Amino acid sequence: MSLAIITGASSGIGAEFARQLKAEGVTSFWFVARRADKMRSLGEELGVEYKIIEADLSTSEGIEAVKRALEEERPSVDYLLNCAGFGSFGAADEIGVLTIEKMIDLNVKASVLLTHICVPYMPRGSKIVMMGSGSCFTPLPYFNAYSSGKVFILHYTKSLNYELKKYGIRATCFCPGWVETEFLPKAAGENNTTRPRPSAIKPLLKCEKVVAGCIKAMKRGRAMYVTGWYTKLQHLLFKILPDFILTRLWLGMLDEPKEER
């Protein structure tokens, strides 16, 4: 029996990982997210053994719930997929401090802490996926807290992959471009928030396709997987062009900031 722990499993990329890992032969899942009804529906859809941990991972109580479940059951964890996260577009004066705090706690802190508590339960051959982003390659004004957190995740995962080699565990940072999930509508926020024009971020990548590519990269032990032609180009240009040029390209995709209207 193989076990996958998936955070953010109630929808989007997390739920798609569950579907495709089942097809890869995974027989048991722990779903970790806030929406128990969505996770229950996913488990019934897949027809597999599953456990639901209803938790807000941006809080210490949410992290503790996963830790407690591991200590009680002491499972062998073959896959850990840190898919929980959210973003919020807007300038520093458009986003509240509580939103920024929660973004960092969920996207960065929770991913690191959950990885730290799961690794002792992972045998040789286990795989870890960390949710990076195409936004981690370029400074992005008006998406700053989110994209900067993904820079941390990228560097953390690359270092972690090196550290865990001696245990036979590999970690992959998944860096997609804009994917067709709930993420973008929620990130766009209010109409008066600085954000990308919808036409500037289309066509969106299909969730099924990007997850399938990440699973292949994960199985090969790659430390990073970048998908989407725009994101791949961005990654390449980041290596050869100064930041300000790439940032200008990004700014050209945005609605005008409030002060310029």
Image: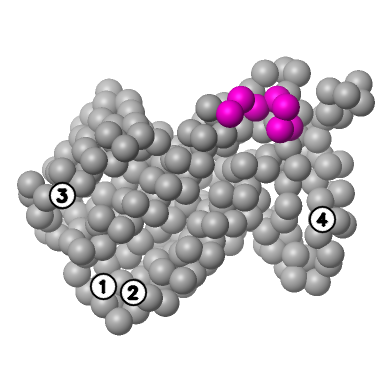
In the drawing, what numbered circle is on residue 246?
4
Instruction: Report the residue that reaches farthest toward the right.
Output: 260
Residue 127, quarter of the rendered image: bottom left
Distance, label 4 to label 2, CA atoms, is: 34 Å
Q: Which residues are magenta?
A: 91-97
Residue 34 in sight here: yes
- Residue bearing the label numbered 1: 125
Distance, label 3 to label 2, CA atoms, is: 20 Å
Please tell me which residue is depicted at 56% across the width and 49% down the height of the picture.
149
In front: label 3 or label 4: 3
**Comes first in the chain, label 3 or label 2:** 3
In the drawing, what numbered circle is on residue 70?
3
Question: What is the crowding at mark 4: few (fewer than 14 residues within 10 Å), some, or many (at least 20)?
Answer: some
Distance, label 3 to label 4, CA atoms, is: 43 Å
Q: Amino acid at mark 2?
A: Leu
Q: Quadrant of the C terminus?
A: top right
Question: What is the crowding at mark 3: few (fewer than 14 residues within 10 Å), some, or many (at least 20)?
Answer: some
Q: Amino acid at mark 3?
A: Leu
**Comes first in the chain, label 2 or label 1:** 1
Distance, label 4 to label 1, CA atoms, is: 38 Å
Residues 236 and 108: in front is: 108
**Comes first in the chain, label 3 or label 4:** 3
Residue 217 in sight here: no
In front: label 3 or label 1: 3
Q: Amino acid at mark 4?
A: Leu
Q: Is residue 261 left or right of residue 25?
A: right
Query: Pointer 3 and pointer 2: residues touching (CB < 8 Å)?
Result: no
Distance, label 2 to label 1, CA atoms, is: 11 Å
